[in-house]
Image (cartoon, rainbow, N blue to C red):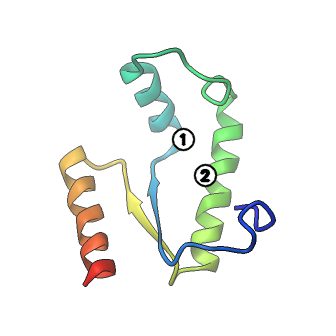
Amino acid sequence: MNLFATEGALPEKTIYLDVPSELGLKRIMTHRTEDVDRLDLEQLDFHQRVRSAYLDLAKKFPDRIVVIDASQELDDVKRDVIEVLDQILN
């Protein structure tokens, strides 16, 4: 996140839905209903580098960034997100 653009503001919690790049691209191509955007057209190694950068941030800020395995079934991902939100709100 660009601290200059956000004037130094950071969220207290960030939920990062992590999925292997190959699976993410497959889901985009299978389920996309509108046109793909320029990021969707990037090569696999680009998406792997982006994912790696997000995972590095999550390791650097474990109290602020919660990683959820989004390669699970949708109902399981929803359950995990709700659990995190319950912890934040209660």
**For this view, does 32 lie left or right of residue 82?**
right
Q: Under tag 2, what secondary structure?
A: helix
The N terminus lies in quadrant: bottom right
What amino acid is found at the position of numbered circle 1 in the picture? Ser
| Relative to 38, residue 8 above or below | below
| Relative to 43, residue 1 above or below | below
Q: Nearer the viewer, residue 64 or 74?
A: 64
The C terminus lies in quadrant: bottom left
Q: Look at mark 1 in the image and give the residue it sits on.
A: 21
Which of pointers 2 and 1 lies earlier in the amino acid sequence? 1
> Distance of mark 2 from mark 1, alpha carbons?
7 Å
Residue 10: horizontal and vertical position, in percent? Answer: 62, 74
| Relative to 38, residue 62 above or below | below
**For this view, does 69 lie left or right of residue 21?**
left
Q: Mark 2 Cα within 10 Å, few/some/many (few <14, many 20+)?
A: some
State the residue at coordinates (24%, 65%). Answer: 82
Q: How many marks?
A: 2
Q: Under tag 1, what secondary structure?
A: helix
In which quadrant of the rendered view does residue 57 lie? bottom right
Residue 80: horizontal and vertical position, in percent? Answer: 26, 64
What amino acid is found at the position of numbered circle 2 in the picture? Arg
State the residue at coordinates (50%, 84%). Answer: 63
Q: Mark 1 Cα within 10 Å, few/some/many (few <14, many 20+)?
A: some
| Relative to 70, residue 82 above or below | below
Q: Nearer the viewer, residue 22 or 86?
A: 86
**For this view, does 80 lie left or right of residue 67?**
left
Q: Look at mark 2 in the image and give the residue it sits on.
A: 51
State the residue at coordinates (73%, 74%). Answer: 8
